[in-house]
Image (cartoon, rainbow, N blue to C red):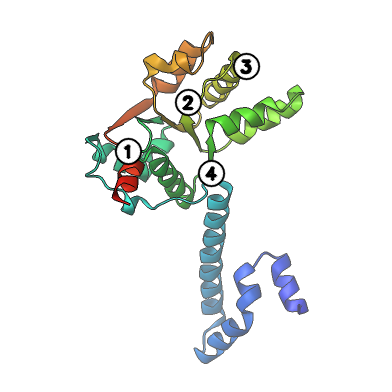
């Protein structure tokens, strides 16, 4: 690595550090004035900074693999509010710290929609974290000291958008319910949550049997929220039958 490249990287001029030879050659060929050179350099570095920031946010979101929303078959569900879901995909609700509840039986694309909401949010400059509800609980439960638990909470409280997937497929003890409530409570009116669930709120007592915080949890979660229900038969079952 040349001293020039090292210096440019130290200054965090990432694009120029990798393309300085071509950039200088282009400037000479175009007979650009010093002011034009600086203007072009700033433009290219800002583009590179934006690209790297987007790449970093998408990676940090932990979305894994997923199908793009363009592959979603809107005609398959028997009931779906496409306009509201497409509005959620734009991410405007994040600016107002509102929540989205994706409710419906398994196999109807709730996770796919949630991941696309998260991906769009990351592209549009919002810090995002995607997690299954069970993984979040396991990560919080393993912390034994109050200091480490507070640090673990920050992982789920700090981002602009938290996506909690698959709430309702497993039941949890009172400790798990308290941990979920603490996450929701700390994010209340300060950050948005997207939750996918296969159960109506009236049935959440089967997820959190005997949890004293259940009413308060649902109250805070739904106070500034839109519940988007999807009804119909499983996409996966349809694909299996077709095969």
Identify which residue is drawn at 51% across, 74% down. 40
Q: Which of marks 4 and 1 is in front?
A: 1
Dot 2 falls on a residue whose secondary structure is loop
Q: Counting residues from the N terminus, which is met first, the one under dot 4 or under dot 3?
A: 4
Query: Label 4, on which residue?
Result: 127
Q: Which of marks 2 and 1 is in front?
A: 1
Front one among 113 and 128? 113
All told, the count of numbered labels is 4
- Give the spatial CA distance, label 2 vs label 4: 16 Å
Residue 33 percent location from the top left of the image: 53, 83
- Give the spatial CA distance, label 4 vs label 3: 28 Å
Dot 4 falls on a residue whose secondary structure is loop
Query: Label 2, on which residue?
Result: 189
Q: Is residue 121 left or right of residue 19?
A: left
Front one among 115 and 216? 115
Q: Which of marks 2 and 3 is in front?
A: 3
Q: Which of marks 2 and 4 is in front?
A: 4
Query: Label 3, on which residue?
Result: 175
Q: Do the residues labelled 4 and 1 touch (CB within 8 Å)?
A: no
- Give the spatial CA distance, label 2 vs label 1: 34 Å
Dot 1 falls on a residue whose secondary structure is loop
Q: Counting residues from the N terminus, which is met first, the one under dot 2 or under dot 3?
A: 3
Q: In this view, does 152 lie to the left or right of 45?
A: right
Query: Label 1, on which residue?
Result: 234
Q: Counting residues from the N terminus, which is met first, the one under dot 2 or under dot 1?
A: 2
Q: Counting residues from the N terminus, which is met first, the one under dot 1 or under dot 3?
A: 3
Residue 37 percent location from the top left of the image: 55, 78
Furthest toward the bottom, the residue is 29
């Amino acid at each position: 690595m040349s001293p020039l490249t090292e210096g440019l990287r130290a200054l965090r001029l990432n694009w120029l550090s990798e393309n300085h030879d071509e950039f200088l050659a282009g400037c000479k060929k175009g007979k650009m004035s010093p002011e034009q050179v600086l203007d072009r350099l700033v433009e290219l570095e800002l583009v590179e900074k934006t690209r790297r920031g987007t790449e970093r946010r998408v990676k940090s979101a932990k979305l894994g693999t997923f199908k793009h929303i363009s592959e979603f078959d809107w005609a398959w569900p028997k009931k779906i509010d496409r306009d509201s879901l497409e509005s959620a995909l734009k991410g405007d609700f994040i600016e107002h710290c509102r929540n989205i509840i994706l409710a419906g039986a398994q196999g109807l694309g709730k996770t796919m929609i949630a991941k696309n909401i998260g991906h769009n949010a990351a592209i549009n400059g919002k810090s995002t974290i995607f997690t299954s509800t069970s993984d979040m609980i396991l990560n919080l439960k393993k912390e034994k000291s109050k200091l480490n638990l507070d640090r673990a909470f920050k992982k789920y409280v700090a981002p602009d958008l938290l996506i909690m997937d698959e709430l309702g497929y497993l039941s949890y003890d009172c400790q798990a319910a308290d941990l979920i409530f603490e996450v929701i409570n700390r994010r209340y009116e300060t950050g948005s949550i997207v939750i996918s669930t296969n159960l109506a709120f009236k049935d959440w007592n089967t997820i959190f049997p005997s949890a004293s915080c259940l009413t308060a949890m649902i109250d805070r979660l739904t106070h500034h929220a839109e519940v988007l229900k999807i009804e119909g038969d499983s996409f996966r079952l349809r694909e299996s039958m077709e095969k």
